[in-house]
Amino acid sequence: MDKSQYFKVVFILFKKELMSYFNSPIAYVFIGVFLIVGNWLFFSSFFLIGQASMRSYFSLLPWIFLFLSPAITMRLWAEEKKSGTIEFLLTLPITDWQAVLAKFFSALAFLFISLLLSATIPLSVAWFGNMDNGPVIGGYLGALFLGGSYLALGLFISSLTKNQIIAFILGLAACFAIFIVGADFVLAGAPALLAPVMKFIGLGSHFNNIAKGVIDTKDVIYYLTFIFLFLWLNVRVIERRAWK
């Protein structure tokens, strides 16, 4: 199979997976909750601070994504295994990588659409004052990288179980752990030799760098490596047919 045919198959599967979100009312509930919670938490303090800045919004996003991302991925493999449709999917003339990539990019596209709908926030902030666009662009880019990392981890965990609730809880716990491991309050009590390693491993420290509007190559490489690692692990689980 040549590259064009390979990615054509991924795109077909991607469209199917993405449409499955919007064929369910749960997707609209997720987007509604994301927009309402994000807007309310941000604007409840925005007028008190009196600055045309979205820094407080981007400090909230990782925590909102912490719950939203596992909720998006919990069904992607777990539901297929529980219903038995995974057997049919993997007997199609597709590779395991194609199946995993289609599910990942459909989840990422859903997250991107949710972020896109939050564009009313920067437009409102720019209306009220002189906003620095650099941190806003960096914040949204960092949110996509962070969200993609959460999704890759959640997708991997979903492949380990048939139960969506277990997939959600484990995904939430794993994303929380990998996010805060590099947080300042955690590093304060860590041994001096481990602190730099923990800071590098933590998803949050890299997000904070990008959200400042500083796009460092090492942060981008870190996120891409993290995403690839858990997609690769996902493929390994599928190859083993661990549900049998």
Image (spheres, rainbow, N blue to C red):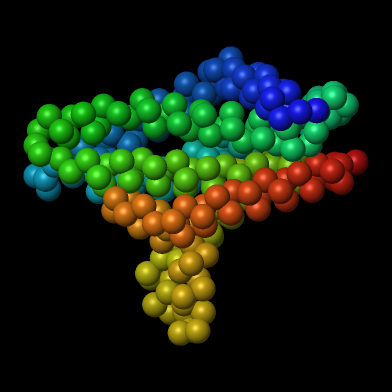
Q: Is residue 231 left or right of residue 209?
A: right
Residue 241, image x, y percentages: 86, 42
- Image vertical order of residue 96 relative to residue 219, above or below: above
Residue 185, image x, y percentages: 38, 70
All told, the count of numbered labels is 0
Q: Is residue 152 left or right of residue 91?
A: left
Residue 82, image x, y percentages: 79, 32
Image quadrant containing the N terminus: top right
Image quadrant containing the C terminus: top right
Residue in view at x 66 percent, y 30 percent: 102
Q: Is residue 235 left or right of residue 231?
A: right
Quarter of the image where one finds residue 129 = top left
- Image vertical order of residue 166 relative to residue 113, above or below: below
Residue 3 visible = yes
Residue 227, image x, y percentages: 59, 48
Residue in view at x 53 percent, y 34 percent: 108
Quarter of the image where one finds residue 239 = top right
Residue 45 visible = no
Q: Between 70 and 156, which is closer to the camera in this rendering?
A: 156
Residue in view at x 44 percent, y 56 percent: 217
Residue in view at x 49 percent, y 62 percent: 202
Residue lying at the far bottom in this picture: please name it: 192
- Image vertical order of residue 25 relative to residue 175, above or below: above
